[in-house]
Amino acid sequence: MKVLTICGSMRYAKEMIQIATELELNKGYAVIQCVYPSEGMCQETDFAKLDQIHKKKIAISDGIYVVNIDGYIGTSTRNEIAYALENGKEVLYHEKMDDLH
């Protein structure tokens, strides 16, 4: 069973929760989800800490699953993809990408 960390824009937080459930129930992956903070819940320093924690999640995973709805991949997610690739992790995309990087 592969362990995947889900990555994507927080604008798709609800979708990422649903996709993670589908990946576990239908594909047999163990999915590590990210933290989905509500607006105003975190301060700037918290985001840096959450970024470090998310990278640790990627490090202990077999790969990442990028939620790229309508092809959208933001800066943070691009950085997570780069981090995963630099560390030899598999990168899977929710939607097919013509130009992966």
Image: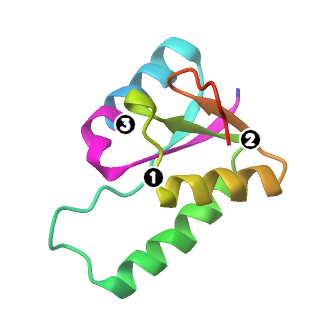
Q: Residue at x 65, y 54 (%)?
A: 58
* Bounds of the magenta segment: 2-16
Picture disc at residue 62: 2
Q: Magenta span has 12?
A: yes
Residue type, numbered disc 1: Gly
Q: Which residue ends up furthest to the bottom in the rendered image?
A: 45
CA–CA distance in space, label 2 to label 1 = 22 Å
Graded by Cα atoms within 10 Å as few (under 14), some (14 to 19) or many (20 or more), the crowding at tag 3 reads many
Q: CA distance from mark 2 to mark 3?
A: 18 Å
Q: Is residue 73 left or right of residue 63?
A: left
Give the number of the mark in front: 2 or 3: 3
The label number, if any, that marks residue 16 in the structure image: 3
Q: Earlier in the sequence, mark 2 or mark 1?
A: 2
Residue type for callout 2: Asp
Indicate which disc, 2 or 3, sits on the residue closer to the N terminus.
3
User: Which numbered marker is on residue 64?
Assistant: none
